[in-house]
Structures are given as structure tokens and as C-alpha cells.
């Protein structure tokens, strides 16, 4: 007869000579049974768990390893994954993320169909000048729930615009299109794909450290991973802002419309400081100036360059 060692709360397995298997979560009962015959028997991992000072050291080492992986290894792995990603993978990842957000955050849009169609018409003008085919970019409307006014793009070109952002824009459709042009920039530069890989890596690290986190925690990590995919680095936001200017110019729309969007955020949300709350994103005043300066540089650029 062979009995598995005790490891935390993992069920014990008892293998009998005839090949049968008995599994139980009653670790204390198994230990009492073993105590009748093998008083000193205890699993190595269980002994580590009982020795608190050593457990503290092991926990600290695990945290340091996870932090080092997050800061150093994860970015390199993400870049490698992006380079090796076949075309079908972004579609699968995007569908999965969209499904998770629809189940946990979003609800059906309440915008009138006339308003949706009017936005789609202008959106098609910038999509026509984006990389790839215009059909690669699909605009979806959702009620944003607790994330409120927002727009984002998934790696396969799926874009989502919330009712709350449309309401915030107050009928300024070019402002809305400027934001969507910004999101197309994230797709073209593969920012969204990088963020989804990063979100998956973060969730994996949490599960690696925490072990069996349970279905409820898995749902939280899935939802959190989807929301993490909506955020981007400072450089990524700058690139997308510039791409918005370029696409709007090509579509004969207001190239600084997204600058007006940030001005509206200052007015409505009070972001007038030199830096934003989120350290990885440039503050609204800096972004506005950078957009105006970039558009002016294109005005001054010699024809044909």
C-alpha cells in the first residue's frame, strides 16, 4: 500500500496492491492512521509548511521571483509571443475577452440605431485608410457599466464604444471618431495584443503563487485581465494619438478632434494637473499639447515626404 505525502489541503491518495485507489480530503484522519504505524512519517512539503520561519523565507523568495519575472522576463516573453503569433490567435483571444467583458461588465447598448449608424458611417471613413482591409475593423456599441465612458480595441480589430462616451461627447461625432482612430492605432501597432499577453502572464503568476485559487478568483482574474488589456503604456498612447491625427487628416476630418476630447475630459473629470493619476499614461495637458504639435509638424512637412 502506498500513501501520498501531505501537501497543504490537497486530497490524499491511497494506492492498494490490487490497483485500486482511495482518495480523501481527511488529511487529519490519514495522519492519525499513519501515526499508529509510522509515528514519524510526514511529507517534506508538509514539514516545510509547519516550520514557520522557513515558510516565511520560501514565501519571500516566491514573491521576489514573481516580481523579477513580471519586471524582466514577462516583457521579453510578450514580445516573443507577439512575433510568433499566427493570425488566428488574435481572433480567438479577442472573442474570449469580449465574451468575458459581456458577461461581467457590459450590457446591450441603449443608443438609438440612427445615432449608431451615423457614427458607423464616419468610422468607415477612417477605417478605409487604416492598415489592412476596412472589413478588419468592426465597431460594437455597449453600455459601459462601471467602466463608464470608454472606447477600446482588441487585437483582431474589434472596437467597442460605450454609450457613456457618446453621451459625454455631447453630439460631437468627430470627437468620437478621433477616439476610434486612436484605438485603430492600438490595433495597427499591436498594443492590444501585447496587453492581452501581459494580462495572461499576470494572471498566470497569481495562480502560480496562490495555487488553487478557486472558480470565484478565476473569474476575478479573467475579468481583471480583460480590463488590464484596456490600458496601455505611455509610449503606446503617444503612438495611438499620432495615428489618430494621421487617419483623421486622410479622411478629411478634424485631425485634432481627439485633443478636444481630452479638453472635455479636463472639463468634466477635472484632470488639470501636470500628471495623471495613472503613472503609465501621460497627463491630459501634455497629451493635448503633443497632439497639437504633431499635427502642426505634419502641416509643415514638405509634400511627398
Image (cartoon, grey):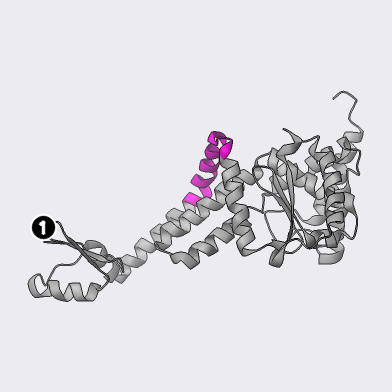
Of the pair 285 and 223, the residue shown nearer to us? 223
Residue 222 as seen in the image, left or right of residue 9: right
Is residue 172 at all visible to an observer of this figure?
yes
Residue 128 as seen in the image, left or right of residue 188: right
**Residue drawn 53% across and 51% down?**
200
Q: From what the image shows, is residue 146 above or below residue 295?
A: below
Q: Is residue 106 magenta?
A: no
Q: From what the image shows, is residue 196 above or below residue 62?
A: above
Q: Is residue 86 magenta?
A: yes
Of the pair 208 and 75, the residue shown nearer to us? 208
**Quarter that holds the C terminus:** top right
Question: What segment is highlighted magenta in the picture?
Answer: 69-88
Residue 268 placement (x, y as % from top left) = 85, 65
For residue 24, what is the image quadrant?
Answer: bottom left
Residue 224 placement (x, y as % from top left) = 58, 60
Residue extending furthest left? 37
Residue extending furthest top? 304
Which residue position holds label 1? 18
**Residue drawn 87% across and 35% down?**
250
**Residue drawn 49% across and 62% down?**
218
Residue 257 as seen in the image, left or right of residue 82: right
Residue 119 placement (x, y as % from top left) = 85, 50
Residue 43 placement (x, y as % from top left) = 21, 64
Q: How many marks?
A: 1
**Quarter that holds the N terminus:** bottom left
**Residue drawn 91% across and 44% down?**
254
Of the pair 127 and 243, the residue shown nearer to us? 127
The kind of secondary structure element at disc 1 is loop
Is residue 238 at all visible to an observer of this figure?
no
Amino acid at each position: 500500500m502506498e500513501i501520498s505525502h501531505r501537501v497543504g489541503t490537497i486530497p490524499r491518495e491511497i494506492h492498494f496492491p490490487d490497483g485500486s485507489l482511495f482518495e480523501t480530503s481527511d488529511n487529519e484522519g490519514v495522519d492519525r492512521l499513519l501515526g499508529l504505524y509510522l509515528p514519524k512519517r510526514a511529507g517534506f512539503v508538509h514539514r516545510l509548511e509547519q516550520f514557520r520561519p522557513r515558510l516565511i523565507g520560501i514565501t519571500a523568495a516566491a514573491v521576489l521571483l514573481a516580481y523579477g519575472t513580471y519586471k524582466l522576463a514577462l516583457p521579453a516573453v510578450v514580445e516573443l509571443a507577439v512575433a510568433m503569433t499566427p493570425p488566428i490567435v488574435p481572433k480567438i483571444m479577442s472573442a474570449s475577452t469580449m465574451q468575458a467583458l459581456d458577461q461581467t461588465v457590459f450590457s446591450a447598448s441603449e443608443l438609438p440605431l440612427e445615432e449608431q449608424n451615423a457614427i458607423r458611417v464616419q468610422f468607415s471613413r477612417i477605417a478605409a485608410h487604416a492598415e489592412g482591409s476596412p472589413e478588419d475593423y468592426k465597431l460594437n456599441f455597449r453600455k459601459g457599466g462601471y467602466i463608464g465612458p470608454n472606447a477600446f480595441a482588441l487585437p483582431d480589430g474589434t472596437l467597442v464604444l460605450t454609450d457613456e462616451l457618446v453621451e459625454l461627447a455631447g453630439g460631437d461625432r468627430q470627437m468620437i471618431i478621433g477616439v476610434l482612430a486612436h484605438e485603430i492605432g492600438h490595433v495597427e501597432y499591436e498594443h492590444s495584443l501585447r496587453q492581452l499577453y501581459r494580462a495572461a502572464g499576470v494572471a498566470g503568476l497569481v495562480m502560480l503563487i496562490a495555487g488553487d485559487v478557486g472558480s470565484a478568483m478565476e473569474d476575478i482574474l479573467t475579468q481583471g485581465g480583460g480590463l488590464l488589456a484596456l490600458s496601455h503604456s505611455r509610449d503606446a498612447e503617444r503612438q495611438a494619438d499620432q495615428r489618430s491625427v494621421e487617419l483623421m487628416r486622410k479622411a478629411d476630418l478634424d485631425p485634432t478632434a481627439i485633443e478636444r476630447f481630452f479638453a472635455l475630459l479636463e472639463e468634466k473629470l477635472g484632470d488639470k494637473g501636470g500628471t495623471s493619476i495613472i503613472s503609465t499614461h501621460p497627463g491630459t495637458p501634455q497629451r493635448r499639447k503633443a497632439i497639437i504639435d504633431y499635427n502642426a509638424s505634419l502641416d509643415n512637412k514638405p509634400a511627398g515626404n
